[in-house]
Image: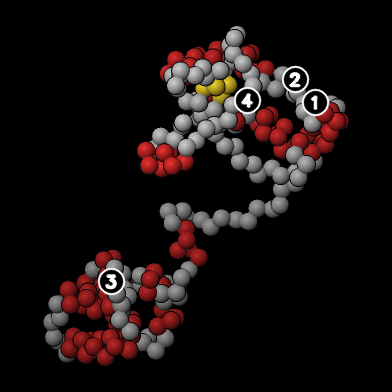
Amino acid sequence: MKKALAVAAVIPTLAQVLSLVDNGASICYYHAKWLGSKLGLKVRLLNEEAMWSALRLIYRNRKQLGVLKTDRSTYSLFRAINRPPRPSDALGPYRFMTSALPAFEFNQDVLLQWLQPGVRVEWETVRSVIIVDAFKWWWESGISDLVLEEFDMYRHHIREINGKFNLGWQRNQIHSLSQQLMRQDPYYYITYAALRPDGQWKLISYPYYTKYTVPGDHTFFRHIDINIQRLISEERGLT
């Protein structure tokens, strides 16, 4: 990183150099480039003519360099670290600043009535609801066959640990294509947002393994058993 010197220390040298040039002396471009670097200029972007022009500009405005470093027409001559920050510095590769969005509001009752009449009462009474035909389109479109093939593929690659049956829990299937497809379904998302008592619609869907139940499997819950110490030391945390 190039380090600029205090202006007070460089301006006298700049004055002497410009005086020599005005009197016909030939100054090496690389020495002028070094001087410009110490003044905070983006020297890599300046050819010899532009370099001398920038140095003269700085000298003429030596008592108001703050104006040069903030004016729209000249601030880009200086490195970001050697001038006051600008909002555009935070844009990175993007061209436009983000715009503030208006607060979003939605009517949960209207959505629930659209999803399934009476679902609000059912939810508040038993705290569980079944949305009829929510994923019916999977079977109508034939996607369900592909989903079952994917489940079979994961089932084929999972092993029994310590001789224990997996009971249908496919702990190797955490972020599969079918899971992503379901999590991104607008109907599924609307259902969750409309049923939340806090009305929160900015939701996070975190990955979780699947349950692939076939005849003979138990359906009770089994939690993820993670050994944190082994996960850190061996990158293998399942016990």
Q: How is the image coloured?
A: secondary structure
Determine crowd level at label 2: few under 14, some 14-19, many 20+ residues with C-alpha closer than 10 A: few
Local crowd size for mark 1, using a 10 Å CA cut-off: few (<14), some (14–19), many (≥20): some
* Mark drawn on residue 23: none
Q: Are marks 3 and 1 in contact (CB under 8 Å)?
A: no
| Three-letter residue code for mark 2 | Val
| Real-space CA distance between mark 1 and mark 2, rounded to the nearest whole angstrom | 8 Å
Q: In the rendered image, which residue does mark 2 sit on?
A: 132
| Count of marks placed on residues | 4
Q: Earlier in the sequence, mark 2 or mark 3?
A: 3
Percent of width and height locating residue 54: 30, 77
Tag 3 secondary structure: loop
Q: Kindly indicate whether the residue at mark 2 contacts the one at mark 1 (C-beta within 8 angstroms).
A: yes
Which residue, given by chain and number where applicable, does mark 3 sit on?
A: 2
> Looking at the image, do the residues carrying marks 2 and 3 touch, with CB atoms under 8 Å apart?
no
Pointer 4: what residue? Answer: 221
User: CB of mark 1 within 8 Å of CB of mark 4?
Assistant: no
Against 88, is 194 above or below?
above
- Amino acid carrying mark 4 in the image: Phe
Q: Residue at x 46, y 18 (%)?
A: 163
Residue at image coords 82%, 29%: 126
